[in-house]
Amino acid sequence: MDEFDASARTGFEARRSTERGWYVVDPVGSLVHVQGEDGRPRAAFFGADEAAARALAGHLNDRHGADGAEYVDDGNDTAG
């Protein structure tokens, strides 16, 4: 698992795991979930598509601000 300093986190970011590829985390390091094609929340895993992961992180930072103060309710109660 990746180690990070939570106090240094400033927004949503794209990260890479050797097992799962690219994914997106929120300002506290929790995995971001997005609406899937069936309308249900899905973990934001992107495999080898770095550009897509970075685009989602950028979009979330633009939409919510770098501190992530507002969250989209994905029904998983992972946003705080």
Image (tube, rainbow, N blue to C red):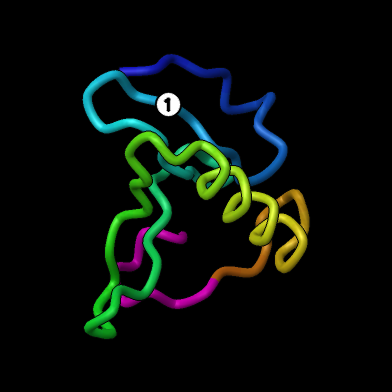
Residue at the spot x=33%, y=31% of the render?
21
User: Is residue 74 inside the magenta stretch?
Assistant: yes
Q: Is residue 26 magenta?
A: no
Residue 35 placed where, x, y %? Answer: 36, 75
What secondary structure is the stretch in magenta mostly built from?
loop
**Where 73 sits versus 12, above or below?**
below
Percent position of residue 49, x then y = 44, 41
Neighbours of disc 1 within 10 Å: few (<14), some (14-19), many (20+): some
Instruction: Give the magenta part as a residue range.
Output: 72-80
Identity of the residue drawn at 22% across and 83% down: 38
Quarter occupied by residue 1? top left
Q: Is residue 37 left or right of residue 69?
A: left
Place of residue 15 in the rendered image (x, y in percent of width and height, measured from the top left): 48, 30
Above or below — where is 42 with respect to 9?
below
Query: Which amino acid type is shown beneath numbered disc 1?
Result: Arg
* Residue wearing tag 1: 16
Instruction: Give the camera-side residue of 49 and 11.
Output: 49
Q: Where, by quadrant of the figure, is residue 69 drawn?
A: bottom right
Does 34 appear above or below 22? below
* Residue in the picture at 36% in, 59% down: 78
